[in-house]
Amino acid sequence: MTRACELKQQAESGGYLRIKKHFEVIARLPKPDFMIKKTIAANHPELGKRIRFRARRIRKQTVIEVLRQLHDEILPQIGFKNIKRFIKIK
């Protein structure tokens, strides 16, 4: 874990930041395929660590979604008393 990641987690636990995770659906599978993560990692090494799986019910059927993890959106939670000062600064 990098130092930036540690600081981000500490700021989130302290209430200074809120993290919103983003994912992109790559594929939907009708049943689990236990070898797909190894296959993707072998063919695309940079994508292998960013693959996640999620089970969802769509029209009364359970579907396995293959997700690619994108960059997190970081939302500041610090309130400013006088925002006009910060708008003028460029």
Image (cartoon, rainbow, N blue to C red):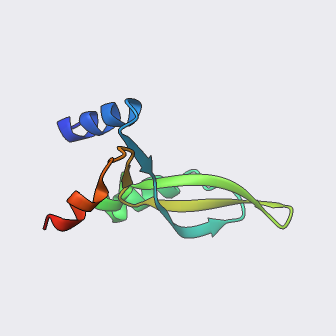
Q: Image quadrant of residue 89?
A: bottom left
Residue drawn at point x = 39 percent, y = 45 percent: 77
Q: Please name whichever residue, 63 or 8, is drawn nearer the observer in this view of the structure.
A: 8
User: Residue 19: x, y in percent?
Assistant: 42, 47
Is residue 2 depicted above or below 34 in this figure? above
Residue drawn at point x = 68 percent, y = 53 percent: 55
Residue drawn at point x = 35 percent, y = 65 percent: 43
User: Residue 66: x, y in percent?
Assistant: 55, 61
Is residue 9 depicted above or below 88 in this figure? above
Is residue 31 depicted above or below 19 in this figure? below
Q: Image quadrant of residue 3?
A: top left
Residue drawn at point x = 42 percent, y = 61 percent: 40
Q: Please name whichever residue, 33 or 13, is drawn nearer the observer in this view of the structure.
A: 13
Is 74 placed left or right of 35 in the picture?
left
Is 27 placed left or right of 4 in the picture?
right
Q: Quadrant of the C terminus?
A: bottom left
Q: Please name whichever residue, 23 or 42, is drawn nearer the observer in this view of the structure.
A: 23
User: Residue 39: x, y in percent?
Assistant: 44, 59
